[in-house]
Image (cartoon, helix red, strand yellow):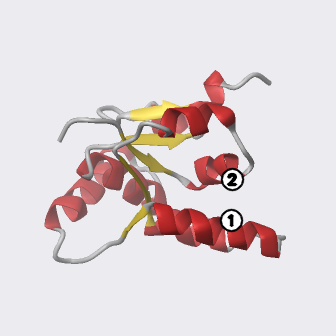
């Protein structure tokens, strides 16, 4: 499949919902945007979420694909297992990175450690933001 495909982790979702122009511009012409169910859960349990935050997040979820975990998706399961064994990353990170790889998508993140993982198509949006 041709075209730009992006999987956002929780910190990218937060930045997007805060109006990060860099991410907004990058996603404008995307053919596919998704998040892992792990990122959905991570965002949902952030302390101090306001009703407005929850409303924006619900609207965001209606516009992207939420990629879940099922035992039937053996390709994703094998990628996650390989990530954990090879890089010793935390399981939630392995799931998110594995989901990006399995979906042939660029991971949008500010997590510099995830961007350094071998064979991980990742974009560190924080490096292109003026501080």
Q: How many marks?
A: 2
Closer to the camera in the image, 68 or 17: 17
Q: Is residue 51 left or right of residue 113?
A: right
Crowding at dot 2, Cα within 10 Å, few <14 / some 14-19 / many 20+, comes out as some
Q: Position of residue 51 (x, y in %)?
A: 80, 76
Could you tell me if the residues under marks 1 and 2 are in contact, i.e. CB atoms within 8 Å? yes
Q: Residue at x 52, y 37 (%)?
A: 113
Which residue, given by chain and number where applicable, does mark 1 sit on?
A: 56
Closer to the camera in the image, 120 or 84: 120
Which residue, given by chain and number where applicable, does mark 2 sit on?
A: 17
Question: The C terminus is located in which quarter?
Answer: top right
Task: Please tell me whether mark 2 sits on a helix, a strand or a loop.
Answer: helix
Q: Is residue 25 left or right of residue 19?
A: left
Q: Position of residue 19 (x, y in %)?
A: 72, 44
Closer to the camera in the image, 78 or 51: 51
Q: Position of residue 35 (x, y in %)?
A: 45, 59
Q: Residue at x 26, y 44 (%)?
A: 104
Task: Please tell me whether mark 1 sits on a helix, a strand or a loop.
Answer: helix
Q: Residue at x 84, y 70 (%)?
A: 48
């Amino acid at each position: 499949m041709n075209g730009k495909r992006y999987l956002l982790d929780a910190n990218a979702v937060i930045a997007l919902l805060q109006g990060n122009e860099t991410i907004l511009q990058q996603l404008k012409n995307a053919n596919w945007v998704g998040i892992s169910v792990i990122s959905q859960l991570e965002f949902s349990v952030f302390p101090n979420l306001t009703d407005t935050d929850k409303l924006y997040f619900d609207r965001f979820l209606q516009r992207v694909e939420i990629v879940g975990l099922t035992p039937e998706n053996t390709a994703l399961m094998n990628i996650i297992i390989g990530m954990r064994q090879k890089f010793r990353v935390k399981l939630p990170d392995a799931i998110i990175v594995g989901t990006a790889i399995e979906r042939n998508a660029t991971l949008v993140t500010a997590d510099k450690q995830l961007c350094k993982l071998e064979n991980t198509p990742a974009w560190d949006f924080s490096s292109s933001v003026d501080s």
